[in-house]
Image: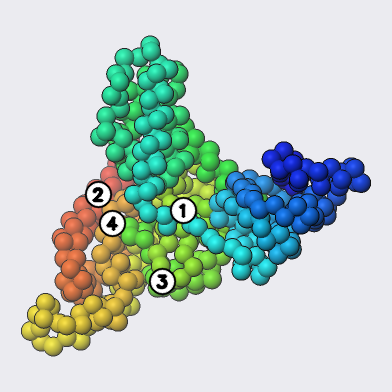
C-alpha cells in the first residue's frame, strides 16, 4: 500500500499532481492491485514527469515495511532504484534501522550515485544530548501538570536527575522515551519511579521491563525470521560471536577479535554472524575499527535470563567469560616472551622515541587486551563452574611459565595496576574454589 498511500498524500498536497492522478485512476481503477513497479510508474513517476513538481517525500521507519518476497534487498528500494533517474526534482528522505535488506538496498548500483547516508551514531553527541534533554524536560513538565494528585513541585525533576538520564541514554532516544513511559505510569508515584532509575546508574532492568526488552525481542525475531529454530549449530555460532562482542571489557575490532580468539573465528565468520544485527550492534565497515553495542541495555538484556527468555538468544556470561579467559591465556602462552619489544638493556621507556610503534608491532591490540583483562574474565567465572578444572589447569600453567613476561608487557603498556588486581583476583578465585572443593569432599566422605 505504500505507493497508493504516497500518491494520495501527494494529490492532497499538490493540485496539479491530483489532476494527473485522477486521469490515471479513471483509466485504471485497479492500479493499486498491480505489481509495485507498475504502481510506482503510473501513480508516482508519470504524474511527476507531467507536472514537474519539486518536493520532498519522507518515508519513516522503512524497517517496519514488511516485504512479501525473500529477495536480499528491500523491495521498496529496489523499485526506487529503477525510477529514481526519471524524477530528478523529487528527493526521498528515508529512515530505518540498518537491517541487512535495507543496507543491501542502498548499495544497489542505481541508487548509490544518488544517495547520501547519515548514520545517527556519528552525529555530534552534544547535539543528540541536547535533543534528549529537551524531550525529557518537556515530557516531565507535562507529567507535573497532569498529576495534580502528586506533590511534585514546579522544579521537578532537578537538573541533576536530567543529567543522569541523559548520560544513561547515551544518545539512545528510545531509552528516553521508555523512561518517560516508566516514570509517568498512572499507577505509581512519578518521583519514586524516577528515583528507581537515577539511584542505580548502571542498571537498566526497570527500563527494560517497560519497553526496551520488547523492542529487542521484536528486532531479534525479525532479524532471524526464516532461520530454522532447530538449527542449533547456527544459533550456537551466533551466541558465541555475540557473547564475545558483548562481554569484552574494551570494544575490539573484528581483526583484533580474531587474533584474540586464536583462529577459532575468521573475519568472514564474525561478520556473517553479526550481519543481521546491525541495528543493535555497530559493526564498522573497516575491520580495524571497534565493534560495539549502541546501548548498554542490549548486553544487559541478552545476559539476563529473566529478561531474555528465548534460549536461542540468551548469552550465558559464565560460559563466554570462560571462553574469553581461556583465549587470553592461550594467546599469552603463544606470544609472550622475554624482552618482547627487543629493547636494549637498561632502557628507560620514556626515552624510547618509537615506543608506540614498537608496542603495536611486537605486542598488538589482542595481546595487550589479553594481558590487561584476563583477570576481569576470571573474576566473573563461578567457582562451581563445570569448566573449573580446565580453568585451573590453564591458570597453573600460566603462573608457572608466563607470569614474569606478563608483568613485563603490563609495564610496557602502562597497565601495571592490572597486575596487582590480577594477582588479588587469582588468589580470591583459588580460595573460593578450594573452599567449595573442600565442602564437596566432606559431604561425600561423611554423608549425612
Mark drawn on residue 102: none
Can residue 337 be seen here? The reply is no
Q: Is residue 341 above or below residue 70?
A: below
C-alpha span from label 3 to label 1: 21 Å
Query: Of callouts 4 and 2, which one flags the residue occurring earlier in the amino acid sequence?
Result: 4
**SS at mark 3?**
loop
Which circle's residue, 4 or 1, is located before the other in the chain?
A: 1
Across and down, in percent, residue 50 comes to: 78, 55
Q: Is residue 172 above or below residue 192?
A: below
Quarter of the view holding residue 328:
bottom left
Label 4: few (<14), some (14–19) or many (≥20) C-alpha neighbours in 10 Å: some
Farthest residue, direction right: 27
- Could you tell whether 69 is left or right of 62 in the image? right
**Residue wearing tag 1:** 120
The residue lying toward the viewer, choosing from 338 and 39, is 39
Q: Could you say which is closer to the camera, residue 270 or residue 20?
A: 20
**C-alpha span from label 2 to label 3:** 39 Å
- Secondary structure under tag 4 reads helix
- Whichever of callouts 2 and 1 sits on the residue coming sooner in the sequence is 1
Residue drawn at the location 58% of the way across and 43% of the way down: 218
Q: Nearer the viewer, mark 4 or mark 3?
A: 3
Number of residues whose C-alpha sits closer than 10 Å to that of mark 2, classed few (under 14), some (14–19) or many (20 or more):
some
Q: Return the residue nearer the eye: 159 or 426.
A: 159
Q: Quadrant of residue 146?
A: top left
C-alpha distance separating marks 4 and 3: 24 Å
Tag 2 residue: 432
Marking on residue 376 = 4
> Residue 193 in the image: x percent, y percent?
36, 25
The residue positioned 37% from the left and 20% from the top of the image is 144
Amino acid at each position: 500500500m505504500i505507493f497508493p498511500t504516497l500518491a494520495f498524500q501527494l494529490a492532497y498536497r499538490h493540485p496539479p499532481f491530483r489532476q494527473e492522478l485522477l486521469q490515471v485512476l479513471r483509466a485504471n481503477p485497479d492500479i493499486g492491485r498491480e505489481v509495485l513497479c507498475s504502481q510506482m510508474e503510473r501513480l508516482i513517476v508519470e504524474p511527476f514527469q507531467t507536472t514537474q513538481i519539486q518536493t520532498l517525500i519522507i518515508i519513516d521507519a522503512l524497517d517496519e515495511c514488511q516485504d512479501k518476497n525473500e529477495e536480499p534487498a528491500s523491495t521498496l528500494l529496489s523499485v526506487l532504484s529503477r525510477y529514481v533517474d526519471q524524477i530528478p526534482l523529487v528527493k526521498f528522505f528515508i529512515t530505518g534501522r540498518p537491517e541487512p535488506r535495507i543496507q543491501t538496498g542502498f548499495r544497489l548500483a542505481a541508487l548509490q550515485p544518488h544517495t547520501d547516508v547519515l548514520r545517527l551514531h556519528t552525529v555530534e553527541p552534544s547535539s543528540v544530548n541536547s535533543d534528549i534533554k529537551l524531550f525529557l524536560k518537556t515530557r516531565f513538565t507535562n507529567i507535573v501538570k497532569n498529576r495534580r494528585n502528586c506533590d511534585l513541585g514546579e522544579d521537578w525533576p532537578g537538573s541533576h536527575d536530567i543529567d543522569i538520564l541523559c548520560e544513561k541514554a547515551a544518545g539512545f532516544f528510545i531509552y528516553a522515551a521508555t523512561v518517560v513511559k516508566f516514570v509517568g505510569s498512572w499507577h505509581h508515584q512519578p518521583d519514586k519511579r524516577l528515583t528507581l532509575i537515577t539511584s542505580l546508574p548502571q542498571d537498566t532492568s526497570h527500563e527494560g521491563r517497560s519497553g526496551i526488552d520488547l523492542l529487542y525481542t521484536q528486532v531479534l525475531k525479525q532479524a532471524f525470521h526464516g532461520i530454522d529454530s532447530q538449527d542449533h549449530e547456527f544459533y550456537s555460532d551466533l551466541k558465541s560471536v555475540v557473547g564475545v562482542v558483548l562481554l569484552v571489557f574494551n570494544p575490539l575490532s573484528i581483526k583484533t577479535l580474531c587474533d584474540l580468539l586464536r583462529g577459532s573465528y575468521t573475519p568472514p565468520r564474525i561478520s556473517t554472524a553479526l550481519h543481521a544485527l546491525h541495528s543493535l550492534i555497530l559493526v564498522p565497515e573497516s575491520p580495524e575499527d571497534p565493534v560495539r553495542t549502541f546501548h548498554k541495555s542490549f548486553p544487559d538484556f541478552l545476559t539476563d535470563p529473566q529478561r531474555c527468555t528465548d534460549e536461542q538468544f540468551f548469552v550465558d556470561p559464565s560460559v563466554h567469560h570462560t571462553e574469553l579467559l581461556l583465549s587470553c591465556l592461550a594467546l599469552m602462552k603463544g606470544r609472550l616472551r622475554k624482552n618482547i619489544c627487543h629493547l636494549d638493556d637498561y632502557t628507560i621507556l620514556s626515552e624510547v622515541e618509537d615506543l608506540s610503534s614498537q608496542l603495536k608491532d611486537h605486542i598488538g591490540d589482542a595481546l595487550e587486551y589479553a594481558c590487561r583483562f584476563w583477570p576481569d574474565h576470571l573474576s566473573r567465572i563461578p567457582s562451581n563452574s563445570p569448566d573449573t578444572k580446565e580453568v585451573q589447569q590453564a591458570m597453573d600453567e600460566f603462573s608457572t611459565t608466563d607470569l614474569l613476561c606478563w608483568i613485563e608487557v603490563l609495564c610496557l603498556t602502562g597497565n601495571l595496576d592490572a597486575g596487582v588486581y590480577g594477582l588479588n583476583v587469582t588468589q580470591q578465585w583459588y580460595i573460593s574454589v578450594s573452599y567449595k572443593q573442600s565442602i564437596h569432599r566432606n559431604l561425600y566422605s561423611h554423608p549425612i
